């Protein structure tokens, strides 16, 4: 188990940028990292361009403890993630004997040379698995390579959960109010100034009769978050807030 | 009307990276730009950090003809987009008289000093509107600032449609097959090599009985796309493809 503080994501595929497919893995990843206590700092969406991807990976891996990529791991010409990772680390791509054996076992006599392209991973890559996830995850340095198909991406996050964790959990509270942001600004500024370690968010809700603004309080120290919450509540006018933590209507749901 | 070839997106907000909110505007933007014939090359998701945002904006605006930002335009402390745009262009933020007047008219006697923070835009910013969209869109150079609330973001895209367009439309065909990518690789490599101006995509579909791989062909020249399609079809085995353009099952739908 390795402790990491910060992470970033590289979401790969022309289809994510040309309006053909709606990106779905960022939210899954963000929720998972959050639950692990890891800060996801940045996500980048790029098409299937090796040079662009390698350039971005070089920067992300030097700035964050953990980099997760999504997509581009199949055997066809537009699957260039392993090539980009190899380029970013300045290593060659070589057939990995374990992956080759797994592909041979999986496809049997239906195996085509095309399938074996998927075993061609950057030199020095580790293969990580769990008892639940048979197909190994390719990891090089701090870069974790995941498939882009949302069902597979979700399944593979088990491997991440088994191998990394953050320095501790996040604590979150939220307050729902009918006041708009212009009315809340002065109050929020005071709460922000008095609680430098608490992240205060303010989210207007449109087309909803049950509340106008959701205020979030997040931090690594539960007592600091509670103190900020009490300060905020003490400064709201009579009749507020509409609700705490759970939205007053059906329109808001915590991500699952 | 301005002709632009390339675009990028900067999607702003801590909530997009901490698992609280699922990003929704990238797909809407991607579909809109695609329909306009503009190539969306990159999207970046960042939290509410002025220095990080300004640094990213500086790079995006120098590399792409058009940059669209989403989020961070409200009046509270976590709305830092205008500040980041000002920093990226090296200009000050000043109250814009038109925006101030609009806010005064909108809020009337309920106006608070907090509301006026939304009129504080980068010096030199243009205000663009249409007859349909009353609230103006703030544009500085090639950077367009849109709100993050998905309902509002979608509404504002009308302004983009009225003011920019690409060099011409994209042409797209797609082919659905029960062959897997390993079996398709050699065929696809030949189609790719013979059609350098056609973008060939290959997308495995999991947990679907109606097809295994969707192949897409995209380009700016319709006749080149058609030629690539015919080359591909002529190389598929008997019984293939399962369908062309419209998926064989209900599982695939063109984005609306």
Image (cartoon, coloured by chain):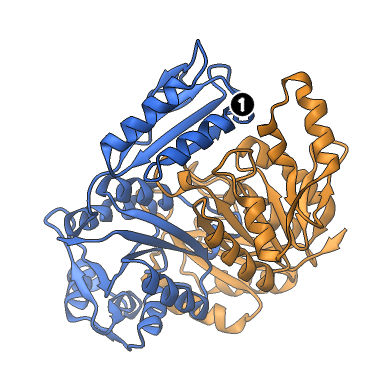
Chain colours: A blue, B orange
Callout 1: chain: A
Q: Position of residue A51 (x, y in %)?
A: 50, 81
Q: Eyeballing the image, is B62 above or below B179?
A: below
Name which quarter of the figure residue A205 lies in: top right
Q: Eyeballing the image, is B154 above or below A155?
A: above
Q: Which residue is drawn at 21% across and 77% down?
A: A100
Residue in the foreground of this view, choosing between B230 and A117:
A117
Q: Residue at x 14, y 60 (%)?
A: A1
Determine if residue B198 is in view.
Answer: yes
Q: Where is residue B25 in the image (x, y as percent from the top left)?
A: 59, 46
Q: Residue at x 29, y 44 (%)?
A: A220
Q: Where is residue B90 in the image (x, y as percent from the top left)?
A: 70, 66
Q: Eyeballing the image, is A72 above or below B193?
A: above
Q: Residue at x 51, y 71 (%)?
A: A48
Q: Where is residue B103 in the image (x, y as percent from the top left)?
A: 78, 32
Name which quarter of the figure residue A83 lies in: bottom left
B17 displayed left or right of A121:
right
For the N terminus of chain B, the quadrant is bottom right
Residue in the foreground of this view, choosing between A173 and B192:
A173
Determine if residue B240 is in view.
Answer: no
Q: How crowded is mark 1: few (under 14 residues within 10 Å), some or many (20 or more)?
A: some
A214 displayed left or right of B154:
left
For the C terminus of chain B, the quadrant is top right
Mark 1 sits on what residue?
A183
Describe the element under mark 1 as helix, strand or loop: helix
């Amino acid at each position: 188990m390795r402790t990491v503080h910060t992470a970033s994501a590289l979401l790969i595929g022309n289809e994510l940028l040309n309006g053909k497919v709606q990106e779905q893995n960022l939210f899954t990843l963000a929720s998972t990292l959050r639950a692990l206590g890891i800060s996801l700092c940045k996500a980048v969406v790029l098409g299937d361009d090796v040079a662009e991807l390698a350039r971005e990976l070089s920067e992300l891996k030097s700035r964050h403890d953990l980099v997760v990529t999504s997509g581009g791991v199949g055997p066809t010409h537009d699957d260039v993630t392993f090539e980009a990772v190899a380029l970013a680390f300045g290593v060659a791509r070589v057939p990995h004997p374990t992956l080759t054996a797994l592909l041979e076992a999986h496809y049997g006599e239906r195996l085509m040379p095309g399938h074996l392209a998927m075993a061609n991973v950057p030199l020095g890559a580790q293969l990580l698995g769990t008892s639940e996830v048979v197909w190994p995850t390719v990891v090089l340095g701090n870069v974790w390579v995941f498939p882009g198909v949302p069902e597979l991406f979700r399944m593979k996050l088990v491997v991440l959960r088994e191998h990394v964790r953050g320095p501790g959990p996040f604590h979150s509270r939220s307050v729902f109010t009918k006041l708009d942001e212009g009315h809340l600004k002065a109050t929020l500024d005071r709460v922000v100034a008095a609680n430098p370690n608490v992240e205060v968010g303010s989210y207007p809700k449109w087309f909803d009769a049950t509340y106008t603004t959701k205020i979030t309080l997040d931090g690594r120290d539960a007592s600091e978050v509670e103190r900020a919450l009490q300060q905020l509540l003490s400064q709201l006018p009579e009749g507020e807030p509409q609700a705490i933590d759970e939205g007053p209507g059906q329109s808001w749901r915590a991500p699952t």
